[in-house]
Each structure stands twice: as structure tokens, then as C-alpha cells.
Amino acid sequence: MADTKIALKPADFQSSQEPRWCPGCGDYAILKQVQTVLAEKGYQPHEVVFFSGIGCSSRFPYYMNTYGMHTIHGRAPAIATGLKVMRPDLSVWVITGDGDALAIGGNHLIHALRRNVDMNILLFNNEIYGLTKGQYSPTSELYKVTKSSPWGTAESPFNPVLLALSAGATFVARTIDREVKHQRDILKQADDHKGVSFVEIYQNCNVFNDGAFADFTDKKKQPETTIFLKHGEPAIFGTNRDKCLVVENGKLKVAHIKPDGELPENVYVHDETSLEKALLVATLFGPADQVPRPFGIFYRVTKPTYEEQLRQQRERAKRKMGEVSLQDLLYGSETWQVK
Amino acid sequence: MADTKIALKPADFQSSQEPRWCPGCGDYAILKQVQTVLAEKGYQPHEVVFFSGIGCSSRFPYYMNTYGMHTIHGRAPAIATGLKVMRPDLSVWVITGDGDALAIGGNHLIHALRRNVDMNILLFNNEIYGLTKGQYSPTSELYKVTKSSPWGTAESPFNPVLLALSAGATFVARTIDREVKHQRDILKQADDHKGVSFVEIYQNCNVFNDGAFADFTDKKKQPETTIFLKHGEPAIFGTNRDKCLVVENGKLKVAHIKPDGELPENVYVHDETSLEKALLVATLFGPADQVPRPFGIFYRVTKPTYEEQLRQQRERAKRKMGEVSLQDLLYGSETWQVK
Amino acid sequence: MGEERPSVTVRFAGDSGDGMQLAGINFSFESALEGHDIATFPDYPAEIRAPRGTLYGVSGFQVRFGKEEILTSGDEVDVLVAMNPAALKRTLHLLKEGGILIADSDAFDAKNLRLAGYEFNPLEDEILKQKYRVLSLPITSLVREALKDSPLSVKAKDRTRNMFVLGLVFWIFGRDLNIAKELIKKKFANKPDVLDANLKVLEAGYYLGETMDIEVPKIKVAKASLPRGRYRTITGNQATALGLVTASKLSGLPLYFVSYPITPASDILHDMAKYRYMDIVAIQAEDEIAAISSAIGAAFGGSIAVTATSGPGLSLMSEALGLAVMTELPVIVIDVQRAGPSTGMPTKPEQADLLQAMFGRHGEAPLIVLASATPADNFYMAIEAVRLATTHITPVILLSDLYLANGAEPWIIPNVETLPKWEPHLWKGNGEYKPYMRDEETLARWWAIPGMEGAQHVVGGLEKEDVTGNVSYDPLNHEKMVKLRLEKVKRVAEDIPLQEVNTGKEEGDLAIVGWGSTYGVIRSVVKQLVEEGYSVGHVHIKYLNPFPKNLKDVLTRFKKILVVEMNMGQLAFLLRGTFLLDVHQFNKVQGVPITERELKQTALKLLK
Amino acid sequence: MGEERPSVTVRFAGDSGDGMQLAGINFSFESALEGHDIATFPDYPAEIRAPRGTLYGVSGFQVRFGKEEILTSGDEVDVLVAMNPAALKRTLHLLKEGGILIADSDAFDAKNLRLAGYEFNPLEDEILKQKYRVLSLPITSLVREALKDSPLSVKAKDRTRNMFVLGLVFWIFGRDLNIAKELIKKKFANKPDVLDANLKVLEAGYYLGETMDIEVPKIKVAKASLPRGRYRTITGNQATALGLVTASKLSGLPLYFVSYPITPASDILHDMAKYRYMDIVAIQAEDEIAAISSAIGAAFGGSIAVTATSGPGLSLMSEALGLAVMTELPVIVIDVQRAGPSTGMPTKPEQADLLQAMFGRHGEAPLIVLASATPADNFYMAIEAVRLATTHITPVILLSDLYLANGAEPWIIPNVETLPKWEPHLWKGNGEYKPYMRDEETLARWWAIPGMEGAQHVVGGLEKEDVTGNVSYDPLNHEKMVKLRLEKVKRVAEDIPLQEVNTGKEEGDLAIVGWGSTYGVIRSVVKQLVEEGYSVGHVHIKYLNPFPKNLKDVLTRFKKILVVEMNMGQLAFLLRGTFLLDVHQFNKVQGVPITERELKQTALKLLK
Ligand SMILES: Cc1ncc(C[n+]2csc(CCOP(=O)(O)OP(=O)(O)O)c2C)c(N)n1
Ligand SMILES: Cc1ncc(C[n+]2csc(CCOP(=O)(O)OP(=O)(O)O)c2C)c(N)n1
Ligand code: SF4
Ligand code: SF4
Ligand SMILES: [Mg+2]
Ligand SMILES: [Mg+2]
């Protein structure tokens, strides 16, 4: 953004409304990071629009001093598309929850991703319905007991990252509420990306699903359960950084790194530009004590955005048709005169 | 199905209604194969239910002498779920088009796949809206000129197989209207599969999108453009069967087989039970003259179906609660007597 | 010898593949060019290409032209073209006694007769020959003969049979072939062999007329005295599309059109997509919910945001329309009604979405409802919809229907310069902005759009405090807002024309009241009745919510009120509920237009 | 000294985390057990856990109990518990002059006062003390003192403050602590320390009353003379869930319940999911469209298929409900209304979905619309919805609302054996089956289900030929089917009770007409008016489409008609449009129930 403008602070993006999330909710941390990123990137509040659906997370726009719309359940990506297509000059963000994006809103999400509309979709995944007080969501694990599944659920969850990749997203990442630096870094890169950015953010709902991601945030467990992907680097993890991912017959396995630090020949080296690799590493989705969970940028490629394609479409049409006045348009091809 | 019943012929599954598709439409071939498979598998017409949405293909149920419902646009997977959950005794089929399943109906589709409802979803993909006379669909290629995109589209298509895999489908296959034997074989295996089966069928719409799949059906081109996947076998193709897929740095490439027939070490060997491999081979989705297109069964694994999980849910509940009479239920936990 | 008539109706009927629409459009256009007023009604099957010869595969195109103002495509036809037995079976009942029947006798073979359910060949039926002037001609053979030197395949040759009958019909009406030839040349410019064949066959048909030895009267129809000006023919859907583009220019606002294909609205999308070079954006959404949703987003961003759909799509938009009401954003929904409920009969006309448009949202969610009356009226009503939406900052539903959408009429092309412009109710950026600050008179909130410095605000589906727009659960505020939203729509009545009696007497015995595509038939019947001395007036309501301020006054000037609708009485119910008026009803829910005869009969009964 | 009153209202108000709901439920239940009739109204914020001390975080629970039939939770309260300044600010206006105010003076610190917007401490306001009997007590300190030996954290200790006020309120009404103790023991069975603390604090509150040196009257309320039987308390949502399970048993049909969570309908899903052991299936769909769609599939398969939702969900179901109308399948939609439009005020009651239920589908798509009148009535109306759906084979919408859903009343538990069974209109398998063969009287089509040999058929959204069910575009058939679908719903009037005057005079000066949750307040007002000598009757309409056959007769027995609704006049509009009756309206759209006082005033004006 233009550097002639006054540099703003995160607080300048904070609205006068006091956040109404439960004390301790993971949403606070994300709000903070988003405000920080906007300030760091030099946006002015009036250049930014936040759309959200319905859910706890979707109250987000009220707390921003930008333009915003708290829409209806599941439709934010579609609503944002309409704005972005007509107003490519604005920075557009979609805030959504796991129910909002993946239950009622699944279709709009995958279509926005496929079309590569240049906006940042932040999915606050707390694996539960917060606002309606604790029903299971499409990301709740199988057999989870919730208000609407007192005997445990009967359905396996979506893997949102995998779904986003398959739908055609050009930027796909995962981060977590507690890792504020990582989160901020991912958000910044998501916003840098020209095209749709899909960021899944694990977010603790301390009221209805407390500790859902404790395996990944607990400082003791974290080194063993998480892999922070880095482009061009081998996937190494472990408390002593003595483990890595290797590829065996097309699957990922965990291998130990020899004491001399030499990496196995078949070590998995992450490549953000490879859809194949992104899909492969996204399949790591098992229980945290068995399968490490990857965080970071899975995939990032540049393709023309939807708005850009629409612009080109207009250029093609204009090239073919030349300047046509409204009067000529009304005339059409066949007219006659009555005298 | 029980072999005590009278064996039926394909024609026994044909209703008295004459199909109303355009002469030459690919839908006819599929209708024929489905009827054949039902007969071969020994079903009785009253044990089978066909649900469809709206579209040319969705007229399918009228031509079957089974139970059926021609529903509304995009909702067939959801409607079928309701029936199957209550009636696991019936064989349930969903007939849908690329617009029906992937435009308006995308959300129900991915949820039915995720839940692993035991039904066969046949997606007739003609890469166009037939019934509404020729608009582009979510599977139409970028820049395609149609009635609703006179200047070419602005959006990249979905890869339905990849999407189905990522949504959690347990059986995913691709076949093509003209390859009737392949088609029949795939349909039979889809029906054999306990759990959701997703079959994408390339279907020629000779009126609005004629020849969309000619690259894969033209007898001369076919050997170079198609790979018929077989479980446990290397992916070999080519007019002289002199080409194969190899895996290089996680990506698939085409390699030539040496004249002595020896396969490269890194040849791609298909494994239906591997999600990783299924995802990888599904990424082959480029132009037919550059990237061969895989057909056959991408993925097949057995997981408890949704109905089965619901049954187990009930068992858990009953075990915990014992027999509860309706009267006791009405009483609830706290009552008092007014005398 | 020629007979002179005030108006004449011709119907081309044949298989879907027989090119009847093309013949019909060609003939209509030529009729208009000759100086006639016209009204057309294409009537095609739901199937894309039904098997040849079947009853459900019959495709028809009816055109009426003449001297008088032509208001309907005609109850009955004077000339019927039947390319095969199925076409005859489906349409013969429309032919007037003494009318001309042109049939391709070659097509009346055993198979086709069976498919049409005829036990014997009707063309050989003596009663038929007595009742009508039957021109049973071996058209297929004649066409093949005419093209014996053409390089085309037999199939391709046979496909020119439509030109043969067109030529013959041209001869009957003493028309000049030149214009038809021009049109054909344009169409087949890139296919010289096909062009050649079509022209040859057209002439063959025409000259057959000249040389025919059976007696067929040439029919003469006096020309209409249409107002001076430059004309084109226009369908309702074309008019809607052009109206939207025009509205964008008149208001100076960018136009966002988004739609999901659905019969009979799709053609609006097709046209809008074509008009990409006019600097508008037209996109195809993944479904109707996405369409209305993205329209809401675009409206938030300062665009004229329009979607077009038909019944099922309108139903799907219910929830999002509620959001548009709550956020008070100017989105426009064009509902091209078709026969319902559910999928219903997608290729047949009906007017049964009115109550859905009025009430089809949970909660108190009022919006503006308009309806256009003729194909060309869609142009003006589309502009009106945009004008009201962008000045009152509120969603609008514009009702059209299949009959208007596909029907065509001659349209005097307006001079763009003379069309009135207006200023959208955009925030000017003076002083502090609050999203629910309103214009005192209209109660329209000020429309500030992203990018405007200092006017940042958040709207949404939760109830908001008046003026500030903060989320509010305050009881009195809620009631206030509910009433404000209602009152804002009510006040639109100050900004729309008063209700007029469209035709006939200003007061008297009977008001015939309609809305939408019944305009033509009601007007025609009222004209006849007035001519016959009855005191009848035609009241056509284009503003359905709010009603024009004087509507009740106008209606109560008549002793009786007859509400005419292609539904079970939806406007009638609204009038009863709103004004406690005891109205009579004429309802027809058959997926076919109301005829002059049946309406006139009903009216006469009430006038007794 | 004790005062004797016919009924008394108590409101517990505090922060969301203060356990006011628990205290309220506990007190209500105990009141019922004591032999009182009760009515309750929980009133909690939209936020899950709003920050402590804020105005929007106040959670309330109001209960009224007494000797008379208790019809509403009371306009005003006799005893108000305010756990902090925000609670006082939000609820003080409800307290009767001379009423008892119990406040935790410890919570009236600077921060809390600021959050509530008080400039000074209201507890120290002399006017307050004059107007009310103020019991300003350092409850937090007293609780901590009482628990000084408890191993609980301070936070956990403070969380028992609700038990302290409960104890005190118990003392005021001279109640026995034992039942409360039992309930607490059940609740905290697994947490002995917490249990212990709760019991201790409960007693501390109670004994404070006994030993208090300020004068607080013990209030005595005579017991109700409820009919004999076994009772429980039941909320509207609980009653709905139980009604559905019961309907399944009575009809012998399997039950499929499917829903997408939404306030205030979610609790029905929670209960149904719990009842998995009753052999029903309850699942959570991906959205409301999937919910109604899968219900249609289940109904096709022979199940009672039910979904429950609230306004936004009902809007989303519009299109699929049209399919249910067209396929004539018995699906049941329970719409627990909340304040709209759009997201509106999701935790507040309203009755503004009636016209949406009636007309919210494109095309002519009639269905049965019912509304329950009291929380327990949901039990019977849920059964009635299922009965009508499965005997008339047509979709039904049952309207409930947030006030009914969350409100509770004592319910005399019916003997299952005495509830009437019925036979669903299932195809018996005699003769050839055609999907649109109908029962001659009801016009219900025969419901044949997959698996029945020889009854294979295809239904769908396209118009079908009568009897055969073949796709048909025939004009007269379409009109016939449109009328059949309408007539079938109309004939339901033969199968429902005649409209009664629910309370008061059978004829006279004024009929007060209502539907849904206004039942209590109207009945109460009518009783008062009749006692005061007015000739007023209460007509409560539970069958909204079709109306009872005699409704017009009943209404016209009164000189004036007042329609009372929590909307802008939707039933009023229906009555006008249907019967041309010039009704008066009382409308309140504030997201809070109508009070007896305001309704009575309006009625009195009309009676003048
Ligand atoms: C059409 C519609 N259906 C249902 C609801 C009720 N509802 C509100 S939020 C929500 C789900 C919230 O879950 P999620 O999206 O995960 O957000 P969270 O609250 O967890 O942040 C639901 C079902 C609604 N508002 N609108
Ligand atoms: C709610 C709704 N929107 C739109 C339509 C119109 N419509 C009917 S079929 C169809 C798409 C057909 O395409 P596809 O699913 O690919 O099926 P095909 O005709 O190609 O077999 C559309 C948009 C409809 N019937 N209902
Ligand atoms: S309920 Fe959960 S997600 Fe919602 S605000 Fe509270 S902690 Fe956050
Ligand atoms: S339009 Fe295309 S898909 Fe439809 S029936 Fe004709 S050929 Fe088949
Ligand atoms: Mg969530
Ligand atoms: Mg298609």
C-alpha cells in the first residue's frame, strides 16, 4: 500500500465495540494478529473490508475499524466475491468458522477457492459450534460427544486443508491461535498472495471444546506432534529435532535422523509450488500421538485471479466489438423506421 | 441379492416411459449399463431406488422400473441420505450432472462422501449444462465459449475425482460413456462397495458440447491419452504400450518403456487402497495432448458406513439406558403427584 | 382473390428440429417491417431434442400481426402449419373454422401417425377438408426435388423444409421475399451451401403458391398506424437486459449482474454476458444463493447489483433477501415466473410467485415488488427497479413471466438522451457517517461504500440500533426498526406514478384488474367491451408493493372488480387483505395464456 | 409477618456466569412440587459468555407461581434478585412498587457500576429504598465466610452465590430446603467438594433469612388446585421432542428426525439425539436444505420425517418444501420462531413467520400450518402434526416460538395407553398402484414405499398426470392438480376440531384472537375482563391452514375482533383476506412478551 499514508498502529484497526467473546477464547489472539498485520502492511481502515458468516468467530467485523458485513450463515465467501469482483481496489477478508465454512457454507467455499478470487479466507476451526452452544461440526472427530451427539458422532471429519487444495486454492496454510508469531507470519503471507488464500487457524473454544488442540500447543508435546513446513527444507521435527518425514512407496512415514545428523535419502523436502507434495503432506491428519500434524504454508502458486480473468474477458469483448454506444446497443441488429 | 428370486433381464428394469434424451446423447449408454448391472446382480426392481437432481441426466429415474424420485436441483445426495439411513435394506443410487452435483449441489455431495453413506453416486459429466441449453458448468475448461460465456469463461474447472477423494469418499472411479464394458465393470464394483461410491462418467452431450471427450474415445487417440488403472499393476499405456507413468520427486511423469520391456524402477504402480496414490494419480488432469487421463478405480477402502455407525450409536445408547418405555420417557426424571 | 382482415394469426408447428422457431421469428420480423403491429408466442417443449414425431416433441411459434394495436398472440389461428401428425394433433384445435392448414403429407406416414396416436390419416378425413382449407402438400419431396443439385445430405436438405412453408406463407400474405432473404443470408453467411439451399427452398415455396392450382386466398392485412420512430422487435428478456444496461448509464453506477441459469430467465444472463463490452460485469454463480449473496456484496461495494431467476431460484433466495432487507442494500431480483410449484412445468407461463415475493421471508421483511406488463415494458420496469432500489436503498423484486420473457413485440427505440437520469442516494461524505442515518422524507439510509475515508461501518443480519448501527437487543429499538423498514417501503408510494385506468372507462360497472403478462388480453377485452357499450375499465397494477396511493380510490369507482390472474388468486388475496374489497376472480392455471374469449365471457357474466 | 397472595413472580438476574438459570429452574421446580401452578421465562443474552458486569451479559430467569391457573410469567415481579449493577439496571423497571429487591452489595463496586453506566451506587439511593424493600447484602463476603473451610478456589466459591440467594428466596416463601437439596445432590453427585459447598451456601442463605434483623415479610402463596395426576415441568422444546417420539409409537411408523442447529430450536435436536435408545434416528445435517431434503427422502421411504428449525432455516427450506408439496410426502417442519428479519435477535421471541409458512414458496404450494399455544401444548400439537401429515400425506409446518420453546409449565403426564392411535394412509398393496390414486374423501394419495413389490413408482418436482403420475404438460391436468393440492389441504378442515371460544363469552362485544404463545396473556386478560363484567371471548387459533370450518361463524358472533400478535399483523391480514373481516390489531414487535396490562388497556379501549 502507498507509503505516503500515515502509518497506523494495530489499535487503529480496533473499533469502539468491545469484543464479546468468552474470556479466554482463542478468537482474541487472532483478532490481535490481524490488526497487527494490517497495520504492518500499511493499510488504511477504509481500504479494507471484512466479511463474516454467523458463529462466534463471525462477530469479528464488529471489532474492526474497517468496512465490514456480518452476513448470514455460510454465505460470506459468495458475498465477498461480489464485492471483490466489482472492487478489486479493496483488501477483502473472509472470517468464518468450521460450521460456517464447512457445514452450511461448503459449496461457496470451494467455489471461491476454485475461482481464485483475491481474498483472504480465515477459517477459525474450533471443531465445534460455539455460538449455538456446543454441537459437533464437520471437523469434530468421529465419536465425539457433544450436545447433539450424546452417544458420539457417526461421521468422520473433513480435512479442511486437503479439501481446499483439491478445490483449487492457490494458497493454503494452517496455523494455530497460540502461536502468534507463526500466525502473524502466515497471515502476512496470505495477504501478500495475489489470489485466494485459505488459512485454517486452530482456535481453542475454551467453553465447549477446551483443549481440542492442546496436543499441538502444549509446550512439552508440541515438538513431537507438530511439523512446521518450510519451503525447500526437509520436514524435521521432534524434541531433539531428531525425526523427519520420509517418503516410502508414495506415503509419508516418520523416520529417525541418525546421530550424525545425516538425513535419509528419501527425506520429505517441502515444496510449496507442488500440488502433489501439498496433497501428500496434507494427508497427515491422524491422532496427534501417532501422526505429526503439519503447520505452515502447504501450497502457494500464482495464477490469474478471477477478477483479472474477468478484466481480460472485458478486454477481449471490447477488442472484438469496439466502442458501442448505449444508443447503438438499444438499436440492436435489425430496426425499421415508421414514418 | 438372494438367488431364490427370479433372475431378471436388463429390460425388466426399463420403465414404460420412452427416454426423452436427444438422439445420440451419451446418457442412453449409461442407462443401458445400469440396467444391465442391476439385472446381473440379481436385484428386484422394488429393492432399488434412484434419486436424481435436475438436468438432462437427472431424468434417469423415469426410465427405470424401480422406485425413484426426480428431485430438485443439487439436493439428491441429501435426499438419498434420508432414505438410506432409514432403509439400509434398499439399494440406493444417485444420478447427477456436473452442474447438479458440483455447482448447486457441491455441499451435499461432499457431505454424503464424507459420511460414507452406502449409495452409488453416478456423476454424468458432460462439462456443460444440457437441460438449460448450453451454459458452462464447474467442469467446463477455462476460456470455454458457451451461451453464458460468449467471451470465454474466467474460471478453472473442478477436478471431480480429486475433490471426491479429499472429501473422504471410500470408492472413487472414473469411466466414460463409450467404453461400455469398462463402464459396466466399474458400476458393478461401485455397487459391490459397501459405503459411498463416487463414479464420474464422462458423457457426451452431442448437442451442446459435442466431442468434449473425443480425445479419450477416439480409437486412434485413446491409447495415447488414457490410462486404465488397475490395482497392483504399473500404469502402462500408449499405442504400443510403450509408455508408463513414473514418480519423480513426488510428481508423475510419462516415461518410455525400453524395447526390452523392462519398466523403470520408479514406475507408478497403482494401489487402490492408498489415498496418497489416488490423490497423486488424480492430479493428472491436464490437456489430453500433454497429460494422459486416468480411468478406472482410483481408490477403494472399507470403512464403517454412516448407517452402520448410526446403528452402533443406537446400540451404545441402548446398552447405557436399557429398555425404556414410552411412559417412562414421558415421566422424565422429576415428577410429582397432585392428589 | 385477396381477403382483407384487421389482424391475422399464424402458427408454425413441427418437431423441435424442424426449425419452427426460426421460421416464426423470420415471419414476425418481416411482418413488423411491413408496418404491422405484432405479438408472438414461442411454445417449445421441455426436452432439448425430443425424439422425432412424438407429441411432446412438438415445437410451436405463434405470431399475430395486423393493423390494430396487437395485444395478444391470438386465441385462434388463421393459418396453421403442421409439419407432422404430432404437430397437427397438438394444435388443430387452435385453427379457426375456415382457416388454412398447411401440412407436409410426406410426414404423415404410418410411424408418425402412430407416434401421434392417429388411427388413420387425418389429412384424408373429409370432415377436416370441409372445416378447413387444407393444403396437404408433399413438402419433403418438393424440397428434395428443389435441391436435387445441392451437395447437401438428404438430412440437411430436409432441414430446409421450414423455408418452404415460410415461402408459402409469404406468398399467402403477399409479402416481399427480399427481407427474408437478407435475414437468411446473415444467418448462414459462413455456410454457402446451406445458404444456397435455404434460399432456393424459400423461393420454391413461394412460387408454389403462385402456380398452385388449388384455390388459396391471398390474405391482405392492413398496416398498423404505429407512432413514428425507429423500431425493433424485442422480447421481454432482451428488454430486461437492455433496461439494466441503460439504468447503469442513467445512474452513473457500475452494474453487477449475477445469475444461475434457469428457464426462462437464462436468456437475460446470456445477453448480459454478451454485453461485457459495455463495461458491465455478468457472471454465472454456483447457485441462486450465491447469486443473491454476491449481489449483496456488490451492492455493499456501490454497484447496481442484479440477479435474475425463476421460481425455484427465488425460493432459494429467501434467506439472503432477508439480509438485504436488514442491511438495507439495493439489490434487485428479477423473477421470470414459470408454472410451479416445485419444478412444475418449466417451459410454461404462470403468475404464482406474487405472494412469495411479498411474504417469502421469515420475520417482517418488506421490500418493493414491481411487475412489468408487456415484453417491451421490461425495459422501463428494469430501469424503474434500479431507480427505486438506488434511491430508496432497499431491495426490489421485479416480476416478469415466461410469456413476457419469450414473447416479442415491436418496440420504438427510445432516444437515450431523453431518458430521465437520477441521483443514487449515495453518501456525500459530509460530516460523521452512521449507517442508519436516513433521508427524512424517504427514510432511505445513506449509502456509503468501502473506500470512502472515514465512513467505515459494519452492517449485518442482527438487529441494529437506529442511526448508529450498533448491534441492539433493545425492545423499543427493534420495534422502531421493524416499523422504519416497513414505512420506508410504504413511502415509495410517494415516488411512483398514481394508478391509472389503463383502458376504457374511468368509472362504471366493472374494473378488470390485472398485473403482469395479462395486460394484453385484458386490454383487448376491455376495448371490445367498451366498443360494445359497456362501462368497463382496465386497471393494470405494475406497483404491487407498495400499491399506488390512489389504488383503492380507483378500484372503488367501479361497481364490480374482477381480478384476472394466472394463479389461484394471489393479487385478489392481497387486495382483499389490504383494502377489504370483495373482488371477483378469474383464474387460469394451465400454463397457457388466458384467451380473449374466455375472459370476455366471464366479464359479460358479471356485467349482466 | 406473612402476606398471602394469589400469585407471585420472582426474577433472578445476574451475569451469565452467575447460575441464574440454575437457581430459577430449581426454584420453579420446587414451586411446582409444592403444588403451585407455574410459568417460567428464561431470558439470556446472545453472547455465550459476555464479559462480567456488562449490560448485555445479564442473564435472567423469571418464574411466576400461584394458586390460580398461571398463564404468563408475569408483567411485573414481586421479588427481584440482582447479582450486580448491570442486572439491576436491566431489570429494576420490572419490580413492583413495594417489591423485594435482593442485591449483592459486594458486587456494586466502582468497576461494575461503571460497566452498568451508573454514576453512583443505586443501592444507596434513598428513593430506591423508599420505593422497594431493599435487601442489600454483602453476599460475596457471606458466601466466602460460609465456605472458609472449603478446599474450593475463591472463584469456585463465588460461583455458589446463586445458592445463597436461592436459599434466601426459599426462606421468604417458607419453603422446605429438602427438595432443593436433592436436586443439587443429583447435579453435583460426582463433585463432592462442589456439592458440599452448594449445600452449605444454600443453608447459609436460608438461615440468614431466619436470623435477619431487617424486616422482610415472609410471603405465603396459596397452592393451586391443579387436576389430579402425576406432573412434571416441561418446556416447549421438551414437549415437542416427546410428542414426536410418542407419535412414532402411536402410528407405528419409524421416526426420522434431522435438523441443523439453530437457536431456539436446537434443544429439540439435543433431546431427540438423546432419545436414540427409543429406536428413533436423529441426525445433524450439513444445513437446513439438507435437513428438509433428507426428511423428504426418509418420508419417501416410509418414515415420519421431521425437521426443526427457526426463521432463517425455514427460509432456506422454501424450495424443498415445494418439492414436498408436489410429491405429496408427509414431512413435518417445526419452526421455532424468533425475532427477525434475517438474523434479527436470535434469543428473543416473535411470531413473524406465519405468512412465510403460508406463502413462502414459489407457485401454488399449499400445506398445513399449525401453531401450538403453550409449552406443554407442543406435545399434543407435535402429535397432531404427525397425524395430519401421515393421514393426509401432505407436508405440515408447526409453528412454535422462542417463548414457548424455553418457557416451562407443569404438565400432567398423560397415560400413553389412553392416547389415540391412528392408521397412516399407507398403501395396502391391493391391486395396481399408481402414485396419484387418492382417497376419495380426503384426497390423500396412497403412500407406497420402496420395498413394496409391484408398487414401484417415480415421483418428482415436475407436474404429473393425475392418478398415473406420468410427467404431464397438459394444461387442464395442471389446473386440476393445482386445485387438487389445494383442495386436499382444505379438506383437512373435516379432520380437525371446530374452533372454540377458549375462554370467556361465546358471543358478545369483543373477541380477542390470537395464535401461538400469546395464549397465556390473552386468556388471563379475558378472564379478568369477564370477571369485570365485560362480554369478551378468547379465540385461539391453533389450525392456521386450513382454518377450522366454523372460524368465521365464531368470530362474527362478536361485535369487534382484536387480533393480538407479536408481529405487524400477519394473522390479521390472513383473516381480512380470507373472510373480509375488519379486525382490530394489537401488535408488539419488541422481542419481549406482551404484558397483561398493555393488552388489557387496548381491549378496554375497544370496549368503551
Ligand atoms: C441458516 C442458519 N442456520 C443455523 C444458524 C445457527 N448457527 C449460528 S452459528 C452456527 C454454527 C457456528 O459454528 P461455527 O461456524 O463453527 O462458528 P463458531 O461459533 O464455532 O465460531 C449455527 C449453526 C443460523 N444462524 N443460520
Ligand atoms: C434451483 C434451480 N436452479 C436452476 C435450475 C435450472 N437448471 C436445471 S438443470 C440445470 C443444470 C443442468 O446441468 P447438469 O447438472 O450438468 O445436467 P445436464 O443437463 O448436463 O445433464 C439448471 C441450471 C433449476 N431447475 N433449479
Ligand atoms: S463459545 Fe467458544 S468459540 Fe465462542 S466465544 Fe466462547 S470460547 Fe470462543
Ligand atoms: S442436451 Fe445434451 S445432455 Fe441433454 S439430452 Fe441432449 S445430448 Fe443429452
Ligand atoms: Mg466452530
Ligand atoms: Mg452437465
Image: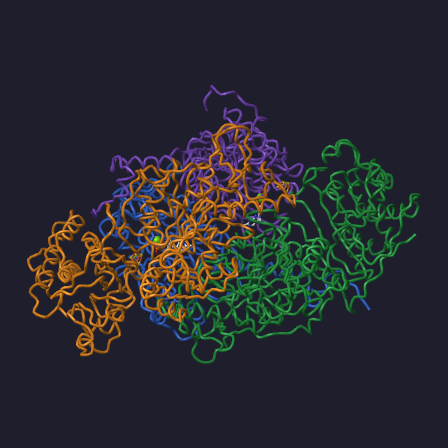
Chain colours: A purple, B blue, C orange, D green
Horizontal relation, residue B242 to residue A97: left or right: left
Horizontal relation, residue D359 to residue A132: left or right: left
Q: Identify which residue, D139 or A149, lies in the foreground.
A: D139
State the image quarter where residue C75 is shown. bottom left
State the image quarter where residue C591 is shown. bottom left
Observer able to see residue D278: no
Observer able to see residue D153: yes
Figure disc tally: 0
**Where residue D30 appears, x then y in whole percent?**
80, 57
State the image quarter where residue C417 is shown. top left
Which residue is most to the bottom?
D431
**Where residue B43 appears, x then y in whole percent?**
42, 69
**Where residue B146 appears, x then y in whole percent?**
30, 47
Q: Is residue A180 above or below residue C140?
A: above
Q: Quadrant of ligand 4?
A: bottom left
Q: Identify which residue, B163 or C157, lies in the foreground.
A: C157
Q: Identify which residue, A233 or D243, lies in the foreground.
A: D243
| Figure quadrant of the C terminus of chain D | bottom right
Horizontal relation, residue D301 to residue D202: left or right: left
Which residue is most to the top?
A4
Horizontal relation, residue D45 to residue D283: left or right: right
**Where residue A296 appears, x then y in whole percent?**
51, 33
